[in-house]
Amino acid sequence: MAELRTEEEQLEAIKRWWKENGTSLIAGVVIAIAGVLGWNAWQDYQANQAEAASLRYQELLALAGQQTLEEDALARAQQLVGELADEHGNTLYADLAALIQARLSIADGDRESAMTALEALIASTDRDYLKGLAHLRLARLQLAAGEAETALATLETDTPDALGIQRADTRGDILVALGRDDEARDAYQRALRLSREAGQPAYGLQLKLDNLGAENATL
């Protein structure tokens, strides 16, 4: 009888515990399951977004790689740039699309739009290499527009080492336009030295130095 009472007491204890805690236990299980399903759905969404961005960028790249773009192809390229910016902002694809947009604008004869695209990229990206590349391209456009002083100011930013040759070369071009030949010579010599240290070709640099009539121009 003692054992029976003990079993009955245990059963009553379980019933009381379930009455007090059963609802919260079920809710916890439901929340846990929902969390797992939600996380999986989020992962699937992210994967789908990445795939969509990649496909859009590949199409944009194919269009931009054509020697000439018909009006409808150019319109499609601009549409893809907009979609990447709107639906995949802050991704590498969106940043690269901004660089392509600038190149397409130049090809279309719209230098102002190209500058705007590069300025927007500089302001938005946290990728140092792309920011440095955008600064370089913007400075070249400003130089081509006759804004040498503005171009020089654009280059006065931290630039990744990988872009050091291009920066020094571009700086030399700007200084030549400003009539500061001695400084331009130094910039070209730096670019030439960096190119040799990196084992990279330096097309045109020696000719630029020769045109300045530099003594000991060849390093």
Image: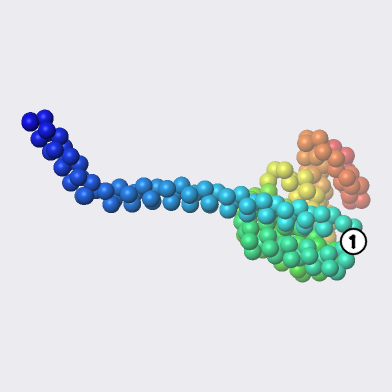
Q: Quadrant of residue 99?
A: bottom right
In the image, residue 193 sits, relative to residue 179, either above or below, namely above
In the rendered view of the protein, which quadrant contains the C terminus?
Answer: top right
In the image, residue 120 sits, relative to residue 50, either above or below, namely below
**Horizontal placement of 35 versus 25: left or right?**
right
Amino acid on which disc 1 is placed: Thr
Q: Looking at the picture, how far across and down is residue 93, in whole percent?
A: 68, 53
Q: Residues within 10 Å of mark 1 (few under 14, many from 20)?
A: few
Q: Quadrant of residue 57?
A: bottom right
Q: Looking at the picture, how far across and down is residue 113, in whole percent?
A: 76, 68
Task: State whether residue 214 appears in this view.
Answer: no
Where does label 1 land, which residue?
68
- Residue 148 vs residue 108, the one in the foreground: 108
Q: Helix, strand or loop at disc 1?
A: loop
Residue at image point 7% right, 31% down:
1
- Residue 160 vs residue 130, the one in the foreground: 130
In the image, residue 179 sits, relative to residue 212, either above or below, namely below
